[in-house]
Image (spheres, helix red, strand yellow):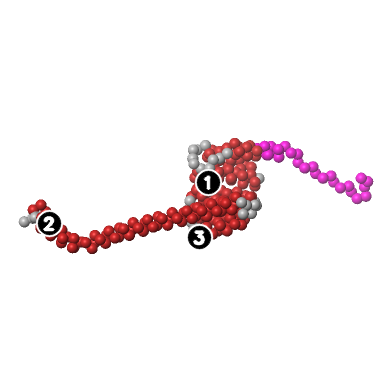
Amino acid sequence: MEWHVEDLSDNEREEQLRRWWSDNWLWIVGGIALGLGLLGGWQYWQKSRMQSAEQDEAAYLAVLDSLSQNQQDAAVKKADDLRNLHPKSPYADQSDLALARSLVDARKFDDAAKRLRTVADSSRDPQLRLVATSRLARVLGEQGKHDDALGLLDVAKAGRFAPLFHEIRGDLYAAKGDAPAARKEYDAALSASATPGEGPALDTQYVELKRDALAGAATVAAAEPPPASPAPAPAAGTQP
């Protein structure tokens, strides 16, 4: 005969509840304790993560403050300390980008390139990697390492940075004296910039100016007369 709860008396239901609690109380209490432990651990992790981010932000702002006061050596030390303490922090990447700009202004291209390459190679942020790559290419161009710079600028992987990559490639080819290649890259930059996106804004008028200047330079070069051949030296023993 099957018994249902509603068929039991109050005393029987109370006794059944006692037996159930006696058999299961350990699992219930353990589950509650585990849940509270996990919740506490998650809250501690979140708090630690927030505190770490706040400390990294403060360190980044300290780098900017040193740069604003022209204390480059102090900025270098602070940026290095942040990178060593939290190498994957986006604030370490931002510090290196800011410091690289200052180093370029000081014509310290090797030091700037080192900072930029670190971000380009190891940043967890894809956009920061592209920013660092574009700036590194310009630094290498300033050093006359045009082919190395061109090798960095893979337009197929540039995404919304494609117009900027094409423009920099055009500048590099122009610096090498390859006007046709430069013109092709400038045209590609203008074409890519016509597609709506969220990448860095392209100064299309400036790109057009650089492209048109290539044609003007070629016209001037073609119009220049060839250098005159030197007059033959008079033969020995003859009067001038």
Give the mark, 1 or 3, whose residue is nearer the N terminus: 3
Q: CA distance from mark 1 to mark 3?
A: 34 Å
Residue 218 position (above or below residue 64): above
Q: CA distance from mark 2 to mark 3?
A: 62 Å
Looking at the picture, tell me which residue is in the foreground, 86 or 148.
86
Residue 155 has which mark? 1
Residue situated furthest left in the rendering: 1
Residue 235 magenta-highlighted: yes
Residue 159 position (above or below residue 74): above
Q: With 147 as the anchor, is 233 left or right in this view?
A: right
* Residue range corresponding to the magenta coloring: 215-240
Looking at the picture, tell me which residue is in the foreground, 151 or 52.
52
Q: Quadrant of residue 180?
A: top right
Q: CA distance from mark 1 to mark 2?
A: 75 Å
The amino acid beneath tag 2 is Arg
- Residue at the spot x=56%, y=57% of the render? 78
Residue 85 has which mark? 3
Considering the numbered disc 1 on the image, is that residue within a helix, a strand or a loop?
Answer: helix
- Residue at the spot x=65%, y=46% of the render? 175
Looking at the picture, tell me which residue is in the foreground, 206 or 68.
68
Report x, y in % for residue 115. Answer: 57, 55
- By secondary structure, the bulk of the magenta-drawn segment is best described as loop
- Residue at the spot x=46%, y=56% of the render? 52
- Residue at the spot x=61%, y=55% of the render? 72
**Crowding near the residue tagged with mark 1, few <14, some 14–19, many ≥20 C-alpha atoms within 10 Å:** some
**Crowding near the residue tagged with mark 3, few <14, some 14–19, many ≥20 C-alpha atoms within 10 Å:** few
Give the mark, 1 or 2, whose residue is nearer the N terminus: 2
The amino acid beneath tag 3 is Leu
Residue 90 magenta-highlighted: no
Q: Split into 4 quadrants, where in the image is the C terminus?
A: top right
Give the mark, 2 or 3, whose residue is nearer the N terminus: 2
Considering the numbered disc 3 on the image, is that residue within a helix, a strand or a loop?
Answer: helix
